[in-house]
Each structure stands twice: as C-alpha cells, then as structure tokens.
Image: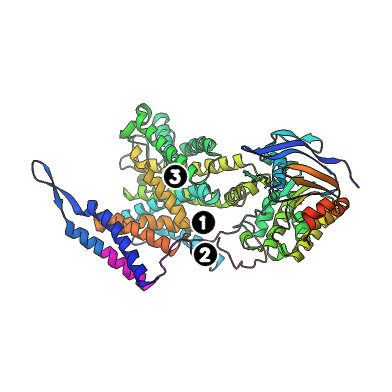
Amino acid sequence: MPGFPMLEVRGLHARYGAIEALRGVDIDVAQGEIVTLIGANGAGKSTLLMTICGQPRASAGSIRYEGRDIAGLATFEIMRLGIAQSPEGRRVFPRMTVEENLKLGATVADVKHYDADLARVYKLFPRLEERRAQRGGTLSGGEQQMLAIGRALMGRPRLLLLDEPSLGLAPMLVKQIFATIREINAAEGVTIFLVEQNAYHALRLAHRGYVMVNGRITLAGPASDLLANPEVRAAYLEGGH
Amino acid sequence: MTVPAMLRDAGLAALVALALALPVVGIRTVDTGAVLGLDYRFGWVAIAVGIVFGGRLTALLLYDRLPRGPRRIRTKGLAGRSRTLVRYAAVAFIVFAAALPQLPFSDRYVVDTATQVLIYVMLGWGLNVVVGLAGLLDLGYVAFYAVGAYSYALLAKNFGLSFWECLPLAGAFAAFFGILLGFPVLRLRGDYLAIVTLGFGEMIRILLINWTTLTGGPNGLTSIPRPDFFGLAFTRSPAAGETAFHEFFGLAFSTQHRITFLYYLILILALVTGWAVERMRRLPVGRAWEALREDEIACQSLGINRTTTKLTAFAIGASFGGFAGSFFATRQGFISPESFTFIESATILAIVVLGGMGSQVGVVLAATVLVLLPEVFRDLAHYRMMVFGLAMVLIMVWRPTGFVTQRTPTVRLSDFTPDPGAAR
Ligand SMILES: Nc1ncnc2c1ncn2[C@@H]1O[C@H](COP(=O)(O)OP(=O)(O)O)[C@@H](O)[C@H]1O
Ligand SMILES: [Mg+2]
C-alpha cells in the first residue's frame, strides 16, 4: 500500500513563548495513506499541524514534503505546494456564502479546474449544494465541517490535513464524515493526515496511527495494532464508541 | 425593569448630567470691562438635570427595553427585503445625481452641497475598501486625502501639469503613502491598528504644517489652478489666445458653469470609484480582503498572502482618497492643513460605519445624511452640532449595524434561493 514518502517530520520542536508544545516529533506519511494522530486534549496535535503549515515555526527539527524541506517557508507558500488544511474549529468565513467559501478555497488552484472541482465537492457533500447560497456562519456544525473539508479540497491538495473533523458532531454525522474522508482517499488518491480525539473511529479509518502525549510520540504502528493495544484501549477507547 | 431600578437608572443619568452641566452651563465668563468675571447659573443646571432625570424616566417607562449591550440584529434591512431593491436604488441614485443640476430647485447652493456629498461618497467608498472589506480600522484616512490634495496643488503650480495629468500621479503618491502606513501595521489589528493609523494621520498633518518651504506651512497653498473644460477656461476674460468656456459655446458668462462642471467631475470620479470597488470585490484580490476580515488564520491556510492582501487594501483605499484630494484642491483653489484634521477622518469613518461596513449603497445614504443634517440645522446655530450628535445616536439605536446590513454575495447563483439568516 504505501507509496513514496510524502511527509517526513524529524525531531520537530515548536514552542509558544516559554511553553514547549512539540518536543521532538517524528512522523512519516506515505503517498496514498490515511495516517491518524490521536492524543488527549492539549497533547500538541493541532500544534503539529500548524507547524507543518509554518505557524508557529519549527524551533528545531525538519519537515520534508515530497522530499523538499519546507520548515523555512511562509504559510502561504507552503499551502501552494499541494498541502491543504481543514483547521481546528472549522474556521469557515461566517458572512460569506457556502459557494464563496469554496471559491476562496480554490485560491491556489488553476481557475480552469474550478467548475469541475466545485461539482466534485458538491458530489461528495450534496448537503453543501443545497446550502450553496447560505452564509457560512448560519450552517450547522456538521455542515460547517463539510464546508471546511470541501474548501480545503478546492485547492486540489495531494496532502490533506484534518484537525478533529468529528468534534462536536452527532455519531451519525461522524460516521458520514469519516466515510467521505475514506472516499476522498480511495477515489481521489488524496493522502490524509487526520488528527483526532475520537480514537475509535480514527483508528478504524486509518491505515497507520500515532499516539501523542505531551508533545512526544509514544506509540506508532498499524491502526489495527493500536486498536488492539491494551494501553491505547485503556487511555483512549474505554467508554468510547 | 422594576420601578426602583428605573429610578436608580434615571438618577444615574441625572448625576452624569450634573457633572456635565456644572462646568458647561453653570459657570459663565462675563466681560466686566477691566477683568473677566464669573457668572453662576445654577438655576439652569437644575433645569438641565431635571430634564435629563424626567426624560430618562419617561423613556424607561415608555419601553423598558432601551438597548443595552448586544441585542437582536434585524435581518430585514433596507436591502434585506429584496436584493433587487439595492440595484434599483443604485440606478435611481445615478439618474437623480445626473439630473440634479438641471432640476428646477437647483441653485448654486444645492449643487455645491451635492458636490460636498459626492466628495464624501467617494471618500467613503475608498475607506470602505480598508475598513469595510479588509476589516482594518483606519483612523487616519484623511492623510491620503491630504496627500492627494497637496500632490495636485504642487504639481499643478510648480510643473504646470493639468488636472488629468495630476490625477494618476496624486493617486500613486497616496497609494505609496498607503503602503508606507501598511508596512508597520501588518501585524496589528483592532484597537492597536486604530491608534497607529490615528498617529499617522496626525503625522502627515504636522508634516504639512512644518515643511513650510514646500507646503507653505499653516498658510497653505493659494491660487491652485482651477480645472478647465478640455482646454476651455471658466473665466469671464480669458488670457490672450485662449477661449473661455462660455465664448466657445456662445453662452453668457456665469459662475454657475464651473460649479456645474465640478459637480459632474466629482460625480464621474465617484461613480468610477464605486464601480472599481464593486469590480474588485468580485476579483480574487477583493475576495481575499473580505476573507481577511472574516478570519485571518483560515485565510492563510488557504494560501492567501496576508502581507500583499493587506498592502493592496491600504494602497487602493489610499489612492481613492488621493483622487478625491486632487478634486478638493482644484475645487477650492486653496488648501491648508486645517482641512485635513482628525475630524475629517472621523466623519469618513462614521459614513462607512453608519452605512453598514462594506455596503456601497449604505455609504451613499450615510454621506447624504451626514452632510445634509448639519446643513438642515444651520439655523439652530450653536445647537447644530448637538442635534447632529443626537441624530447619530438615534440612528445607531435604530440601526446598530448600519443602514444596509446585508452583504451582497460576490458569486452569482443562477437558481438563487434567498438565505433565511442573511444579515451577519
Ligand atoms: N496560541 C497558543 N499560545 C500559547 N500556547 C498554546 C497556543 N496554542 C496551543 N497552546 C498550548 O500548546 C499545547 C498544545 O496545544 P494543542 O496543539 O492545541 O493541543 P491539542 O490539539 O492536542 O489539543 C497546549 O498546552 C496549549 O495550551
Ligand atoms: Mg487541537
């Protein structure tokens, strides 16, 4: 299954002032994979995604994307290399319509793909097409999540970073979103790095997984192994699903 | 609200009134020949406090839901009822504006006042790029107006350039100053940005006062070339070898000609501004401005360059201020730093806020109200500004988010379904 290495993170450190949020993180994501990172609140998962995107900057270590060191680039330059992020908290543009949000997602893409991409996103999320003239801020939580993912896809990414897409959603909706993520990966060949607190669903979806505690990776392996691991079960799955 | 609570509230208002009225109404200086004496008028203070107490109590009793803190925002605004209403309003405005000087009631005063309104419309549309679209609170916009005015005056006086030659140069100078302001404030938002822009506006004004050799200092610049109509001057007796406007068209000389010409000039400039801003809003750069206002982090994660987006907003907003400044200079024929004080920035900002932050039609309404109100109340002399302030307060109570609260989407949808929760 794994293709060539797409993302290689080595010994990554990042800090907010005096707080060291990442303390030597190693992550590998190969082309075509779904890799998940699970961990408790405050472990540093979002910080890792943000650092990959250049904010905050890595204080030590390296980030290679498709073989190229991107740790020194500005955020907008990184996002033009084929990386897209659906950020924590969705961050859709509240006063803009669904379609305007999607149009902004296409900023880094060639305009000639716009119509086809829009149709593609509407096919993945028919709900968004129904709501295309509605303002982002008036969408429900699930719809906003769909919009955040759809907006990221409009940039035609090869690597899609997802930060807690299941947060605050009803179980039915979580299933639906995760099924769509699988489809994006399988049908469109987009590599996915998924950050989640919902460990059960994330590990069932992913090929491989990492566990982060206090800014360090403590466990790594095939998702099915992690799902069976007693430590993981005790810390992240008991009382879950 | 219970009655004791209302009494307490009214009492508090009366206390504030007392604190204000004591020095303002209570003490008056009288000229007793040799020295300046003081005259105490505590009776008047008592009356003022009484009026405030009674007024506040009545207001509370009439409806005990005077706006306090956040409140329900109307979704049905002027434009909320129907999207097409905005388009009709725009067409009606243009037709009316174009016909205005020919209408029977139009005299010099009417056209002059309308010109004043249009200057503010243009400035409002320019500032709207920065404040309304990009969401960058700019309290020093008048600086760009000043740069435009002085650019025109100096270029026209020293190099004999015509108005149309100066216009792009003035816009470019203003844009340059916009970028100059933009760089240091790239990382600032909200209050901090407001303070720095406020300081920038003052810096430009103080520079104009002190750079006497170039700007004439506090005395300003006089005999700035007036505009001509494609080479035809608006004078009774043109210089040798030149033809005056009235001669060319075989009309009797009238000072009204120039005033009407200036009116149409600013109308064209303002319409071009409005059209350009509306166009830009639909281009990637304009959409990026609005996205930046909505969410800076999301914006960057979509590959939008924050630096260039902010700088283009400052530069383009400033260049419209510069164009308006050129017009101001050629219309007045005289400029001095007095014309570019903070109160001008505040007025233009008030137009944008009152108009509804980002709404083009709202700016027209607000500029009209803000220019006409003081004119209408001219007879009230001293109380003019008080009535003006009162009107502003009432408008903000009635429409806390401005005249036109609905943002028109920039993506056209063929089968458009109206959106239920449209405003904000
Ligand atoms: N902008 C910030 N400024 C300062 N500290 C932050 C900031 N964002 C996150 N942190 C801190 O960094 C640590 C990791 O946070 P985060 O990456 O958001 O965790 P997670 O996404 O795993 O819940 C936490 O201790 C958090 O308080
Ligand atoms: Mg997080």
Earlier residue among tags 1 and 2? 2
Q: Chain of mark 1?
A: B
Quadrant for the C terminus of chain A in the image: bottom right
Report which residue position mark 1 lands on.
Answer: B359
Report which residue position mark 3 lands on.
Answer: B139
Q: Residues within 10 Å of mark 3 (few under 14, many from 20)?
A: many
- Whether labels 1 and 2 belong to a single chain: the reply is yes
Q: Residue at 21% across / 62% down in the picture?
A: B47
- Range covered by the magenta-colored residues: B51-68
Q: Label 3 is placed on what type of residue?
A: Leu
Q: Chain of mark 2?
A: B
Please state the horizontal and vertical placement of residue A92, each as a whole percent of the image.
65, 55
On screen, residue B236 versus residue A203, left or right, reads left
Report which residue position mark 2 lands on.
Answer: B79
Q: Is residue B383 located in the magenta-colored stretch of the structure?
A: no
Please state the horizontal and vertical placement of residue A163, each as a whole percent of the image.
72, 51
Q: CA distance from mark 1 to mark 2?
A: 10 Å
Q: CA distance from mark 3 to mark 2?
A: 28 Å
- The residue mark sitting in front, 3 or 2, is 3
On screen, residue A97 versus residue B193, left or right, reads right
Q: Nearer the viewer, residue B356 or B5?
A: B5
Is B363 above or below relative to B225? below
- Whether labels 1 and 3 belong to a single chain: the reply is yes
Q: Nearer the viewer, residue B94 or B198?
A: B198
